[in-house]
C-alpha cells in the first residue's frame, strides 16, 4: 500500500532526453516519460492498450508517442489518436496520463487524484541550481521497502557503525550527540550536535580544519511521505557553529528521495552538494569518491534488513530512544494512507 496523493521524484531531469523514452515502475505502476518537441516532460501509462507492449519500446513522433508493436499513436493526454489501417478509433483506446513537474533538476510525478496535484506542495531544493554549491547525484535500486530507507536516514546514530570507513567518526560521539526531535503535521526534524568531536576521514580529506576536533551538526528534515533533506557540516571546535557562525567550515546539503518501485523495491534518488570554496577545487573529487560509497554502505544494510524481516514476518522489533524521528515519520505516512483509504471506501460505498 502506498500514499498516492503526493509528489514523488520519478527521475533526474537529464534522464529523459529529447526524443528519448524512459520506462520506470513507480508505486507498482508502469510509467513512460518523454518530452514534447518544446522540451516539456510528460508521463503516460507504460502499457499499450492494444496488446500491452510497454510504450517505452516505441518512439516519440512529434509531441506524440507511437507504440513499437502495431503503431498505435497516443497524444500527450494518453488518448489514442491513430490506429494504422483503420479509420475508427475505439473509444476505450487510451492510456492513463500523469501530472509531471520539472523543477530543481528533478522530474516529479503525481500518481493519485489529478485534481489534487498542486505543484506548490513539491519540496524545493534550490542548491541544485546555485553556482555556489557543487553537487553530484545518482539513483540506486534498493531491494527493500522505501520506509526502511527512510528509517535509515532518520536515525543517524548508525553513521558511527555503518560508515566507519567514510563519514563515520567515533560511534560513541554519534550516540552521545545532543539530539532534538521536532514534530509537525507534515514532517519531522531531527537536529544533532556533536560538539568537540573527532572529524571523520571524509571531512579531513575535503577540508582543512584548524583544530583537531570540530563542532559537527546534522539537521535531518523529513517531508512526508518520502523526502529527506540532510544538512550536515562542521567548523573548528569552539567557533560558535551552534550559535549560527558556520562560515569557513564544511557544509553538505543532501537530498534523499525514496520513491517506491514496488512494495519491496525502491528507487533511491540522492544528491549531495557542498559549499564550493575558491582554491579548494579538489573537494569535488573527494566528495565524489566518498558519497557513493557511503550510500552503498546503507544499501547493504537495508537490503539485509528486508531479507531478515521477510524471513520472520511479523516478528516484533524493539524501539529505542533514537527511533523518535522515524517513528513520527512512519506515523505521518500511515495517517496519509489511512485518510486516502477512507476517501476510496466512501467513494466505493456512497
Ligand atoms: S501492442 Fe501497441 S499497437 Fe499493438
Ligand atoms: Fe547511512
Image (spheres, rainbow, N blue to C red):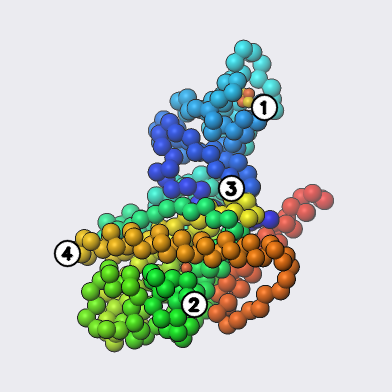
Above or below, 251 relative to 284: below
Give the CA separation, mark 3 to mark 4. 42 Å
Does residue 233 appear left or right of residue 175 in this picture?
left
Residue located 43% across and 68% down the image? 230
Q: Do the residues labelled 3 and 1 touch (CB within 8 Å)?
A: no
Of labels 2 and 4, earlier in sequence is: 2
Q: Is mark 4 on a helix, strand or loop?
A: loop
Residue 119 in view in this figure: no
Callout in the foreground (2, 4): 2
Of labels 3 and 1, earlier in sequence is: 3
Residue located 49% across and 27% down the image? 59
Viewer-nearest residue: 222 or 305: 305
Q: What element carries label 2?
A: helix
Viewer-nearest residue: 172 or 344: 172
Of labels 1 and 4, earlier in sequence is: 1
Callout in the foreground (2, 1): 2
Task: Locate the N terminus and report the quarter of the image it occupies.
Answer: bottom right
Identify the disc placed on residue 26: 3
Identify the residue position indicated by label 1 in the image: 51
Q: Are marks 2 and 4 in contact (CB under 8 Å)?
A: no
Identify the residue position indicated by label 2 in the image: 157
Looking at the image, the residue that sits furthest to the left is 279
Amino acid at each position: 500500500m502506498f500514499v498516492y496523493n503526493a509528489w514523488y521524484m520519478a527521475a533526474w531531469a537529464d534522464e529523459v532526453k529529447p526524443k528519448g523514452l524512459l520506462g520506470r515502475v513507480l508505486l507498482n505502476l508502469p510509467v513512460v516519460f518523454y518530452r514534447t518537441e518544446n522540451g516539456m516532460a510528460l508521463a503516460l501509462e507504460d502499457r499499450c492498450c492494444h496488446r500491452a507492449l510497454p510504450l517505452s519500446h516505441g518512439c516519440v513522433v512529434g509531441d506524440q508517442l507511437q507504440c513499437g508493436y502495431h503503431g498505435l499513436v497516443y497524444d500527450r493526454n494518453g488518448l489514442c489518436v491513430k490506429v494504422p489501417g483503420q479509420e475508427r478509433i475505439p473509444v476505450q483506446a487510451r492510456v492513463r496520463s500523469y501530472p509531471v513537474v520539472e523543477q530543481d533538476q528533478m522530474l516529479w510525478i503525481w500518481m493519485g487524484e489529478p485534481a489534487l496535484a498542486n505543484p506548490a506542495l513539491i519540496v524545493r531544493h534550490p542548491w541544485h541550481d546555485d553556482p555556489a554549491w557543487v553537487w553530484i547525484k545518482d539513483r540506486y535500486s534498493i531491494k527493500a521497502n522505501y520506509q526502511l530507507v527512510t528509517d535509515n536516514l532518520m536515525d543517524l546514530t548508525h553513521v558511527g557503525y555503518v560508515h566507519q570507513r567514510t563519514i563515520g567518526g567515533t560511534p560513541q560521539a554519534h550516540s552521545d550527540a545532543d539530539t532534538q526531535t521536532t514534530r509537525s503535521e507534515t514532517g519531522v526534524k531531527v537536529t544533532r550536535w556533536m560538539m568537540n568531536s573527532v572529524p571523520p576521514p571524509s571531512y579531513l580529506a575535503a577540508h582543512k580544519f584548524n583544530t583537531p576536533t570540530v563542532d559537527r551538526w546534522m539537521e535531518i528534515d523529513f517531508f512526508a511521505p518520502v523526502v529527506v533533506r540532510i544538512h550536515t557540516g562542521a567548523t573548528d571546535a569552539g567557533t560558535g557553529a551552534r550559535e549560527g557562525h558556520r562560515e569557513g567550515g564544511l557544509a553538505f546539503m543532501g537530498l534523499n528521495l525514496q520513491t517506491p518501485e514496488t512494495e519491496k523495491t525502491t528507487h533511491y534518488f540522492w544528491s549531495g552538494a557542498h559549499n564550493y570554496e575558491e582554491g579548494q577545487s579538489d573537494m569535488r573529487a573527494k566528495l565524489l569518491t566518498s558519497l557513493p560509497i557511503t550510500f552503498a554502505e546503507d544499501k547493504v544494510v537495508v537490503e539485509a534488513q528486508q531479507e531478515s524481516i521477510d524471513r520472520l514476518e511479523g516478528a516484533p522489533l524493539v524501539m529505542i530512544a533514537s527511533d523518535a524521528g522515524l517513528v513520527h515519520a512512519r506515523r505521518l505516512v500511515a495517517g496519509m494512507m489511512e485518510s486516502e483509504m477512507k476517501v476510496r471506501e466512501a467513494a466505493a460505498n456512497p
